[in-house]
Amino acid sequence: MSKFAWVTLATNDRYALGALVLAASLRRSNTKYSLHILYTDGVSASMKSQLFSIFNNSTKVNILDSNDSQNLALIGRPDLGITFTKLHCWRLIEYEKCVFLDADTLVIQNSNELFQHPEFAAAPDIGWPDLFNSGVFVFVPSKETYQKLVEFGTQHGSFDGGDQGLLNQYFSSWRTMNESHRLPFIYNVTPGSIYSYKAAWQLFGSQVKIIHFLGNSKPWNFQDPQQGQHWEYWRQIFDEDVAGNLSKDLVNFGQRKVDYF
C-alpha cells in the first residue's frame, strides 16, 4: 500500500457526488497514490457503496461542528461549521503523508509533486492572501496533531467559524515559513478569480492543476447557468465516469437544485 494518499470528505450525498467526480479526475490524471474518503452518517447507503467502489480506502467519522453561528454569519455561510469534521484527516496514521482536497475541487493535471511539500503546505486565499485556503493542503497524519487541533478549536474557536479559520490560527506561522510551505495558486484556482484577472489567466491558465469551486454555487447543482470550461469538464466527468454507475434516484438527485449541507 502506498504511504501517500489523497484524502477528501463527504458529509452528505451532495458532497459525495463531488467526491466521486474528484476521485475520477484524480484517476484521469494518472495519479500513483491511493484515494481515501472520510464519510459520515449523512451519506446514504447507496451513495456509500459508490464511494467504496472508487476509493481505495474509507473511514467513517463523527461530525465535528464549530457551532459558531456568529462568525459563520460574517462570511454568509452558516453551513460551514460542519467542516471541522475535516480535522479527522490527521487520524489517518496509516499514511506517511497526505494531500487533503475538498470535495468541491477538481484535478485538471497530475499533481503528484504535491507530496514533496512538507506539512503544512497550502495556497494563499484569494480573499486575504496572508491566509491560506484550506481546500487543498499537504499534511502529515498524527494523533498528537489531531488532539492538539481539537483542543485548540475547543479553547479558541475559529475566527470565521469554519475549518479555514481554525487551521490558519493553529498554523499561524504559515505566512512566514519558507516557500516550500506556500503552494502556487495553480493548485487551488477558484473560477471567480479567473474571470476577474483575464490577462493572468491567458498567461498562466495552461498551468492550472486543481480547480476549487468555492462558494455557494457548486457544479453538481445542474440547474445553474453555464459557468465556464471547468464547470463543463466537471459535468463531463460526471456524465462519462460517474453517472453510469449510479442508481436512477442518485442521478436524478445530482440534477436537482438543492441546499448545501
Image: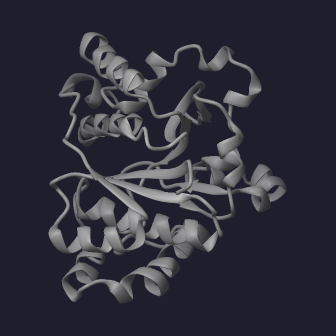
Residue 233: x %, y % from top left: 56, 74
Q: Nearer the viewer, residue 23 or 227?
A: 23
Q: How many marks?
A: 0
Question: Looking at the image, which residue sits at the far right?
Answer: 203
Name the residue at 28% across, 82% down.
251
Q: Nearer the viewer, residue 236 or 221?
A: 236
Coloring basis for residues: one colour
Question: Looking at the image, which residue sits at the far front?
Answer: 1
Residue 19: x %, y % from top left: 40, 62
Q: Quadrant of residue 118?
A: top right
Residue 121: x %, y % from top left: 61, 32
Q: Is residue 28 above or below residue 173?
A: below
Name the residue at 65% across, 44% down.
115
Q: Nearer the viewer, residue 239 or 57?
A: 57
Q: Is residue 196 above or below residue 43?
A: above
Name the residue at 29% across, 15% down.
151
Q: Nearer the viewer, residue 159 or 28?
A: 28
Q: Is residue 170 above or below residue 15?
A: above
Q: Is 46 positioned to the left or the right of 222 in the image? A: left
Name the residue at 36% across, 36% down.
91
Q: Is 196 positioned to the left or the right of 92 in the image? A: right
Q: Is 77 positioned to the left or the right of 142 in the image? A: left
Q: Quadrant of residue 31?
A: bottom right
